[in-house]
Image: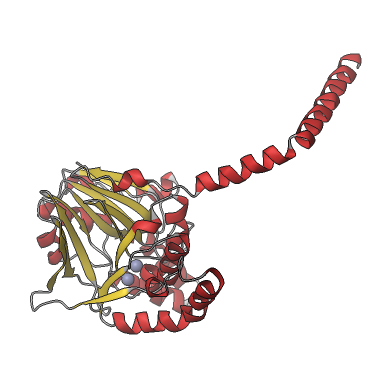
Amino acid sequence: MKKLSYILLVLFLLLIFVGVFAFINQEKLVDRFISRQSDALSFRTDLLEDNDDIKLVTVGTGSPLPGERVRSCNAVFVGGKFFVFDVGPGASRAIESLRLPMDQLERIFITHWHADHYIDLPELINRSWLIGRTNPIHLHGPDPLDTIVQGMSQFMGIENQFRVDHHGDEFFDIAMALPVSHTITLDAMGYQKVYDQGGVTVEAFAVDHEPISPALGYRIKYKGKSLVISGDTKRSDQVVKYAKDADILLHEALAFDLIKRAIAIQKENNNRRGTTILTDILDYHTSPREAAEVAAAAGAKKLILTHLGPAPENPISRRFYAPDLDEVYEGSVLLAEDGDLYIIE
Ligand SMILES: [Zn+2]
Ligand SMILES: [Zn+2]
């Protein structure tokens, strides 16, 4: 009992000491807190260093199925440039949390006009402008890109003008508030070279996500290295063609076996809406095994699965993403996680 009283007394004195210390130093503590907040805003400029490599950050790896993951978004650093491919829900906040250099973001490429791939466009463009982007942002995507940009202009116009009115046009150039749009028009073979500067090329190709058309995949090449992003597609020979000998094939995959079990449960519960939607989903996506077959046919060196639905957050659901993939593909297969960094050296 005596010992307990002694401990309590020591704790009490300690508490008083901490309180007095905090009171005396409160100004310093506040300054330190503010400076720490400022540090949190410092960007990872190291990613912009051109080491003849391609760096990929899988910012968002989720699908529209329920889950905590950020939805479709990939950041690519190549030749000293910062590009983003798709801007799904949560992408802008995630890019900021990862301290990717938003003020240097130069180009955004959209695969197709499903909300899980572009809904954060206004947020990312606006946020990069607020944070200090002074260069134009180029937005590449399939038709009707101009309609999307016009809509964004109406949606964000009043906000953008408020910023200029408040802070002045020295720091907020209204011309940078909205993107420069570049509509991608594929040729008869379903192909267009979209970007070709400083040895970096970005090519778009048609994939099969019917009835969503056009839906694009992208290939990024630099100094003999290549990264291929499938976009949303069912198993597609176009991906096989463009992912030939790719260093990384980042392919979408849904856990078909898990979804089929969910469909059976929806049927049992007479949920016609749930049954229909889940059944439709299987029509225009790829199973993990099919993605591995595509990677094998293409001779891709590494396969990273993304757009994961349902998200593999535990050993039971993870099992549905790796059903004997080594039977069809010899390379390594990885399940993407939000915020992972891969470097093709
Ligand atoms: Zn999608
Ligand atoms: Zn889609």
Please state the quadrant of the image where ligand 2 appears: bottom left
Q: Position of residue 80 (x, y in %)?
A: 25, 51
Quadrant containing the N terminus is: top right
In the displayed orientation, state which residue is furthest to the top.
2
Which residue shows up at 39% across the image and 77% down it?
276
For the residue pair 119 and 95, the one nearer the viewer reads as: 95
Q: Is residue 255 above or below residue 277?
A: above
Q: Is residue 270 visible?
A: no
Q: Quadrant of residue 176?
A: bottom left
Where residue 65 sits: x, y (%)?
43, 65
Q: Is residue 64 left or right of residue 217?
A: right
Place of residue 144 in the rendered image (x, y in percent of width and height, measured from the top left): 29, 83
Check the picture and name the quadrant holding the C terminus: top left
Q: Choose top left, top right, bottom left or bottom right for residue 154.
A: bottom left
In the depicted view, which residue is nearer to us: 169 or 39? 169
Residue at 21% from the left image edge and 51% from the top image edge: 79
Residue 34 appears left or right of 109: right
Picture layout, residue 184 above or below residue 127: below
Q: Is residue 86 visible?
A: yes
Q: Nearer the viewer, residue 298 or 157?
A: 157
Residue 206 drawn at (x, y percent)? 17, 72
Q: How many marks?
A: 0
Q: How is the image coloured?
A: secondary structure
